[in-house]
Image: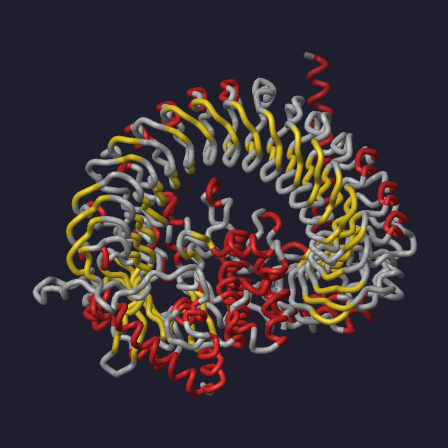
Amino acid sequence: MKKMGIILNNFRCALPLLFYLTVSLLSISVSSELSQSQKSTMLNLSKLLHNQTSMISWNTNSDPCSSWSGVTCSNVTTTISSVSMLSFSNLDLTNSSFLPLACQLDTLESIDVSKNMLTSIPDGFFTACRRIQGLKLVNFSFNHISGPLPSFSSGFTNLESLDLSYNLFSGSIGSQLSDLVSLKLLNLSFNAFSGSVPTKLGKSMVLEQLELSGNNFQESIPEQLADYKNLTVLDLSKNKLTGNVPSRIGQLSKLEILVLSDNSLSGEVPNFISRISTLKRFAANQNSFTGAIPSGISSFLKNLDLSYNNLSGSMPNDLLAQPNLQTVDLSYNKLKGSIPENVSSSLVRLRLGSNSLNGSISSFNCAQLQNLVYLELENNLLSGSIPTHLGSCWNLKLLSLGGNKFSGELPVELGNLKQLEVLSLQLNKFVGRIPHEITTLSHLSTLNISWNLLNGSIPPSISGLTKLAYLNLQGNHLSGVIPGNISDINSLIELQLGKNQLSGYIPPMPRNLQYALNLSSNLFKGRIPESLYPLNSLEILDLSNNRFSGEIPKFLSKMESLTTLLLNNNNLSGVAPSFSSNVNVHFAGNPLLVIPKSSPRSTPLSRRSERLPRVTITALIAAVTAGGLMAIIAIFLAKRLIFRANDLAVQPRDEDYPLSQPVETLILTANSIHKSNIDFTKAIETVANPLNLVLRTRFSSYFKVIMPSGLSYFVKKLNLSDKILQPGSLEKFGQKLRALGKVNSMNIMTPLAYMLAGDSAYLFYDMAFIGSLFDLLHGNCGVPLEWASRFSIAVGVAQGLTSLHGCLSGPILHFDLTSKTIMLKSPKQPQIGDIELYKVIDPSKSTSSLSAVAGSIGYIPPEYAYTMKVTMAGNVYSFGVILLELVTGKLAVSEGMELAKWVSRSWMQQQKWEQILDFSISQTSLAIRSQMLAVLKVALDCINASAEARPKMKSVLRMLLNAR
């Protein structure tokens, strides 16, 4: 107790001293502030920036170091601070005149102006900033800066990091960077640099990271890069490099990442890869490497990608066995032999598809492969049965064994793969019944067992696959009836049951079927059932080669989204109803059927322009002047819109039926003309009459509304009744639409006003459109759209999509980017429509969340089959398909063949390039043909099977502009 008293007494004595020290420290912190000169510079900088952007909110009455966003300070002394870092990233800046002023801060260590819209770097920046001794980081990435690479000569002696990626720089690189003696990180990716790969990158050779991907560098990889002994990252992907990989690169003993993808490199895969103990990732996919895979190449790797080459021979026995190995992609080569037995327990993804591998897969020891998530062995020569122990790979999400020679019965153990989302077993020789256990895989989104020898009936328990989006059972010997509860699979958007022995009653189908319903080549008979009537989203319906009889029901001609209807080889009779010109109908093989002359005929996958003799087309092109062409297009589109409205119309409403009343309205535009002319009550009356319908897209219906003043508007109706568009999500509808209005692009449709009424939302647009790109490109106006217009449309859509992906509040993704959702104000001015859906659709609350975001057939990237997530890379793929439409003149899908797949196959053979291009356009001149080929190459980059390999939209736009 005595000791405790002494301690307490000493503590009391120490309190005044502690208080004094605390106050002293606080006073030091409070009194530490910028010097007068830096204060003045920051105030001037604030004024200059406030005049340029509304995205910055610096309070000039507060301390910049403590409250100004993007400003970081360091203490020089106990009383003086200095600005050390400035970040102007993502502020929507377009003018770089503030940069020289910022460089008056001589204590600056880092300046970041990334993700803006700057077009140049002023000379004053180099004059002022080269004097700053401590400047270590400069970041100009993700802007629009063009011209040659500026020189960093003299000064910048301590600069360690320079990022100029994702701009429009061009020209060759010589000695502009040679004086940067401290440079450790250099990123020049995704520009338009050309010439040879630069090697003068700092006299002291301290470079650690060199990223040059996405340019036009040519010639071979210079061996001088090996002089940079500290390199840990070397990325030369997406260029035009040729020749072998220099052996001296193997001297980079600190290298961790080596990416050589998407070039024209040749020779054998370098065997020095196995000797770099630090190397974790080696990607050399999409080149022209030949020969065998070197033994030991994966000794230290985590990620190996050699896909899309010409590699041959067998896989080394040790290739898959290395303990650190996580992903291996050897797909699309010419590999033979069996799959090595020893497989690393760390492996997460194994892709060996599209080779000539043989043997069985019985050696897969799933007891050790608990990390395996993706197993892709499709399109090989593998045989034998599926081993039962494959059902012990508990974490598999994707199992792709299609296109092999597997046989035997499907093991019931597949039902143990509870995480499985994609099961692809098509094009094999499987026999027996479909195991009931497969129908217990609750996460399954894709089930493809087509083109096998399966028999028995379709298990009724298949309705339990509530997340199933794609079901393909065609080309088997299945018999019996279609389960009556098939309609319970609300997520199903494609159902392929053709070429079986199914019969009996056709039950109601899932209402969200969108891509295709294929019941062809079965034993169905009787009248075409009314149960197909509700399928308003269906695009392809195949009832051919059955025994259907009676008249063709009229509801088929009213199916709003239908593009292909196959009724051939049945016993149909009577007079065929009239179908929209959008629908490709096949009637042949029904001898008792009367086909009116006005009915559309079947058309093969061919250029629409080739339906007329080439001489006639050439004469038309030569004869029609610009004004005449515009007149023809205008007349055609006017007739087309009227026809479509009449075709889709139902009976006019009963005049006594009560109209929905506007419950919320808001004018979004500042234009006084529109403010005074938009009449919401008149709009409600007009859209209630389906005869005013002029256009449909996937999620929307457009009506023409003439206001009392005589001005016309597009009013787009978004239907909320299917629970995809949630009423709860519309509480801040106006706020979300105003945010969209801030997207800076003339190539995006932005609404003038909105209205909520009943269970729908309505958006108002200036009716200045001549139709959709689909109408103008694929319509029957007789004159093909000229190349100048097509190229202008391509660039305009790319600009709009780039703006959406670069939105300051986060990327805006498009749910259904197609030629039908691109509206044209003129043949050269496109606008992307339906962008507001990203703000209001909530797939998680939808009765069919998968179909809500899946998009339209022909435009959907392959990865959506198992991810079902809309991404920027997915939008790039869809845009690539639109580019293909513009270059080829073909539809995205015709007769079941996707345009992207057809072009990808044809491109592999140079003699077929002429067949890809729209002949009526490419024959016009050599210059146009050359430009079309350049755009075609951009499209091929966009539709790359690998989402990671696709360029960003900003890079796509740059490549298109370079194709001029």
| The furthest residue to the front | 591
Splitting the image into 4 quarters, where does residue 655 fall? bottom left
Q: Nearer the viewer, residue 115 or 421?
A: 421
Residue 898: in sight, yes or no?
A: yes
The percent position of residue 268, horizontal first and vertical second, equals: 78, 42
Residue name at image x 31 percent, y 61 percent: 583
| The furthest residue to the top | 1
| The furthest residue to the left | 656
Q: In this view, does 826 lie to the left or right of 4?
A: left
Residue name at image x 61 percent, y 33 percent: 350
Residue 31: in sight, yes or no?
A: no
The chosen color scheme is secondary structure
Splitting the image into 4 quarters, where does residue 289 fall? top right
Q: Which of 715 and 306 is in front in this view?
A: 306
Q: Nearer the viewer, residue 833 or 345?
A: 345
The percent position of residue 284, horizontal first and vertical second, equals: 71, 45
The percent position of residue 776, horizontal first and vertical second, equals: 41, 72
**How many marks do you count on the picture?**
0
Splitting the image into 4 quarters, where does residue 159 fall? bottom right
The percent position of residue 493, horizontal first and vertical second, equals: 35, 45
Residue name at image x 76 percent, y 44 percent: 258
Q: In this view, does 61 lie to the left or right of 314?
A: left
Q: Quadrant of the C terminus?
A: bottom right
Whether 455 is drawn above or below 33: the answer is: above
Residue name at image x 77 percent, y 37 percent: 279
Q: Quadrant of the N terminus?
A: top right
Q: Which of 494 and 257 is in front in this view?
A: 494
